[in-house]
Amino acid sequence: MLNLLKDFDPSKIALKMIEMQKTAIDNTYDSMIAIQSQTEKFTSSLLDQIPYLPQDSMKAFDEWNAAYKKGQDEYKKSFDDNYKKLESFFTDMQKNAAKSKSKPQGATA
């Protein structure tokens, strides 16, 4: 039993959990993008068939879509940047733990 605990590394477990969560969030994000894209195509097609719709309304719809896509991109970039920081934190923790294990018992830093 003690040999199992000797090789126990909480940072590896944390990294695997974070990786799983990132995969789930990425898949959810991709699904949301696909749904939004299909909705945009459907709505655009529907609005194109209305002959008395003012051009200003179509322009507003296009601007709304552009703002929505910009928000999506900013969200994804923010998530990816913060994920890298979190991953770096646990990777650094692993490196520090490996360094401390490799030092002799009586050595000082």
Image (cartoon, helix red, strand yellow):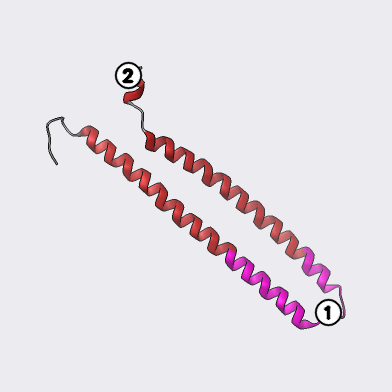
Q: Secondary structure at mark 1?
A: loop
Asked whether, in this view, residue 97 is left or right of residue 43, the answer is: left
What secondary structure prevails in the magenta region?
Answer: helix
Q: Is residue 45 above or below residue 88?
A: below
Residue 51, compared with residue 74, is above or below; it is below
Quadrant, the N terminus? top left
User: Which quadrant is the C terminus positioned in?
Assistant: top left
Between disc 2 and disc 1, the foreground one is 2
Q: Quadrant of residue 57?
A: bottom right
What residue type is disc 2 on?
Leu
Q: Which mark is residue 53?
A: 1
Magenta segment: 42-71
Task: Name the residue located 43 percent from the left edge and 39 percent from the top edge.
Answer: 14
Which residue is label 2 attached to?
Answer: 2
Distance, label 2 to label 1, CA atoms, is: 75 Å
Q: Residue at 37% x, 43% y: name it.
A: 90
Image location (x, y in percent) of residue 62? 70, 74
Q: Residue at x 70, y 60 (%)?
A: 36
Q: Is residue 82 left or right of residue 44?
A: left
* Residue 59 part of the magenta-drawn span: yes
98 relative position to 17: left or right: left
Q: Amino acid at mark 1?
A: Leu
Residue 18, image x and y in percent?
A: 47, 43
Q: Quadrant of residue 91?
A: top left
- Label 1: few (<14), some or many (≥20) within 10 Å? few
Point 64% across, 71% down: residue:
66
Please determine whether, in this image, residue 92 is positioned above or below residue 5: below
